[in-house]
Image (cartoon, rainbow, N blue to C red):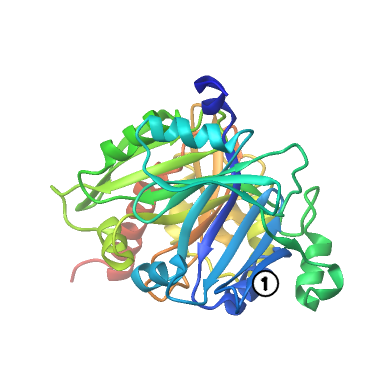
Amino acid sequence: MDSSTFCTELDIEYVELYVEDLEARTSEWVDRYAFSVTARRGSVDEGFRSVALRQGRIVLVLTEGGTDEHPARAYVRAHGDGVADIALRTTDARAAFAEAVRRGARAVAGPAVIGGRTVTATIAGFGDVVHTFVQNDGEHVPGLPPGFAAVPASSVSESASASASAGDEDGPAVGLQEIDHFAVCVSAGELRSTVDFYRTALGFREIFEEHIVVGPQAMNSKVVQSASGSVTFTIIEPDTTAQPGQIDGFLASHGGAGIQHVAFSSFDAVRSVRVLSDLGVAFLTTPGSYYDLLGERITPKNHELDELRELNLLVDEDHGGQLFQIFTRSTHPRRTIFFEVIERIGAETFGSSNIKALYEAVELERSRQSGPAS
């Protein structure tokens, strides 16, 4: 593998979350998000248990550490449940690992053969998040990470079976399709070095940059994307010249840099949000004044204003087109990680104008409620 091949082929294999309670988190993803259980790995005797879940082309791995020796235990103590590994598919894990280390990445685990066939190797990313290279041997089974045993349909719970029947790649009931991007929070002063790491070690490109001001708060953001276009990180640091805000809050509660949210793409955000809401997923609400002002900014495509208002969906527009997005309410005890549903109609950016529009809408709502001065 030459360096150009290494840079252009990387794709997301799976996203692993370390969790404190495997059963509870599995039930949440199956019952509320309609993912299906596809495979399992580990046991109490082995010191860990993992479950693989799938919807569309999204594969999530949930891992619970059973002993203090397993890294999941230390991760959960430090951060609570969260994203620990963004695994990257490649045709040659040994060569990808060697090239990344040559370019400055820190080795975490050298090449190893898993399940008698698949090669994996791991490097450090940001904070306590790592990247495991997973070799695609040409016989890849979607939803079956290396070392996992497929779960027979008869052994899946009744609710998981229902989700699995509706959760095939061609048309899941919820309609979540793939991972659009990851939002990464880093400490002030670490944005440039994090971007440089991905550009140098993994051949990512910097595709977007902005300074976001929300009232007295502000943040700096840069977006890096793999040469293949399939792995995207929106990296954000707080602006220390402004008042502390949500990024500072995440860093304090999470205990350092990490994934603030994972964005799932959808063919139809209205349908996805409606179904997810019916399944019990709670989303952030949007002031009605946001929609009162929306017509001054955008004429929505494909969706009616009334249904956007009903479901609290946000709209943004850039040079490429429009996007519709909404964020879940965090159910994390530390109120750190949450998730996003996003539908793109040509849009290439990430909805930053919604932050300003929401702020203005909240201020308008407050002024309406306070009424005229007496």
Residue closer to the observer: 31 or 217: 31
**Quadrant housing the N terminus:** top right
Q: Is mark 1 on a helix, strand or loop?
A: helix
Task: Write the residue at 45% across / 39% down.
Answer: 297
Residue farthest left in this picture:
241
Q: Where is residue 116 in the image (x, y as percent from the top left)?
A: 70, 51
Image height check: is 136 above or below 8? Answer: below
Q: Position of residue 194 (x, y in %)?
A: 32, 40
Q: Where is residue 2 in the image (x, y as percent from the top left)?
A: 54, 20
Image height check: is 346 above or below 279? Answer: above
Q: In this view, does 337 lie to the left or right of 13?
A: left
Q: Is residue 364 left or right of residue 72?
A: left
Task: Write the residue at 81% across / 61% down.
Answer: 166
Image height check: is 177 above or below 84? Answer: above
Q: Position of residue 362 (x, y in %)?
A: 35, 59
Q: Name the kind of residue labelled 1 in the image.
A: Leu
Which residue is tagged 1?
279
The quadrant in which residue 160 appears is bottom right
